Amino acid sequence: MPARKPPAAPRAPDLSNLAPCVADARAAVASRLEGPPDPVSFDDLVARLDRARDELPPLYRTAVLDPFARTLRELGAAGFRRALDRDPRRQATALLLLDVAQALLQAAEGTEPRATPAFQEVVSDLYDGFLSAEDRRGVKPPDRGVVAPLVKWGRPDFGPYTLTVEATRSVGAAAGVVSLPPSHAGGALLGWAALGHETAGHDVLGADVGLEPELAAAVAAALRKAGFRSVADYWADRIGETASDVMGILNMGPAAAVGLVGYFRGLRGAIDGEEKLQAEGPDWDEHPADAARGYLAAAAVRLLAFAGREAWARQVEAWTDEDAPAVVLAGVRLSRVRARRAAAAVAGAIVRTPMASLEHHALGEIQTWRDGDERVAERLRATLASAEPLPEAFEAGTYAAHAMAAAVELAASPG
């Protein structure tokens, strides 16, 4: 018998159409489109929430609406007004009250009737994926929340963000809230790819007691061991953003890494006028430097469980190289080579270190992107590229995260 040919090496993705995706993100970020006005009248808010009750799924009535309504009744009209007056910039208690209210009202009142259900489906899928009984075998449910976050549109100046269940519990809600700018309801596809960061990252980190500080300690230890003592505290102090980047990629695959680079290029284009990742991360910024996050994303892709991971990682790395001759983290300058190595140590610690808060399992054991996921995304790309109408139903095992991954790669591909 003739010898079998070895399987062909996975092809590098052709993502040469990224620039229009970046332009789409830039236009959406630059938009000042506002969402529905905040419900600042106590009596009107209470009445609207009462009408909303029958329009919400039972799970969200009992987990969010009913306990939130009790919180409002306890505050009363005068207490509600004081909470808003004490937080005029809407960054603390007023933000929590108004965003939980908006999430409930927008779901019940049909705000963005096409985009909102899609937004909710992506968020629910990403959150529920981390809670999957199959993937989480041997790991207890999260301490603070097993209900997927609600979604809302608003606060364009804030960009995509999450209020975790750890925060919303203070106003009675047993689920978090994920927000996108209103312009993203009809654009900024790469901004939707950021939902892995928000939901599979921030929301999950906020749901398991002790997980975030454990990850910070693991990252600092890994960097010191690898010879990067000068930036160990820099990365560990930003563990919320850092781990969320990695966890988003574990859940949405390499498309989340593509979205990270492309969305940040669009963001910088809208703010600074130049579509380039920032190479410097100042000490005061709670977010790592954009370029450091690009290298982190590439390193996280390399740790996924699908055959094409190296080709994808090299592409993300190449884009980051284009924008950053070096990386400066709180005054410490790292060459590209050293920045990549440091990022690899960070990603490895987050993905592979067993965590006591997860019954000594590692995040990469609970969730990762496999060959089966990539095959589903490939089939969906073909479906989305076809002129035929979308099917009424998809095969079992097809989820919203696959659809997001397919859409991002298809949009960034030529043709």
Image: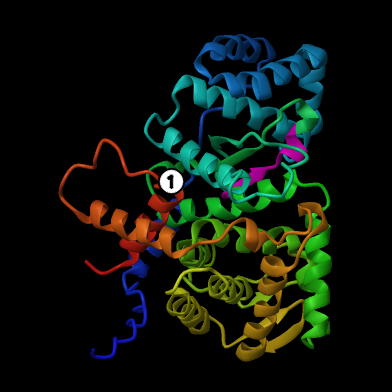
Instruction: Identify the image quadrant of residue 143.
Output: top right
Instruction: Name the kind of residue labelled 1 in the image.
Output: Ala
The residue depicted at 58 percent of the width and 47 percent of the height is 134
Does residue 110 appear to the left or right of 154 in the view shown?
left
Q: Is residue 207 above or below residue 110?
A: below
Q: Residues within 10 Å of mark 1 (few under 14, many from 20)?
A: some
- Where is residue 9? Give x, y as percent: 36, 82
Instruction: Quadrant for the C terminus, please.
Output: bottom left
Q: Is residue 162 magenta?
A: yes
Front-lying residue, 292 or 136 = 136
The residue depicted at 54 percent of the width and 35 percent of the height is 152
Q: Magenta region: which residues?
A: 158-168
Asked whether residue 38 appears in the rendered view, the answer is no
Q: Is residue 48 above or below residue 120?
A: above
Q: Secondary structure at mark 1?
A: helix
Q: Is residue 150 above or below residue 29?
A: above
Does residue 70 appear to the left or right of 108 in the view shown?
right
Front-lying residue, 133 or 265 = 133
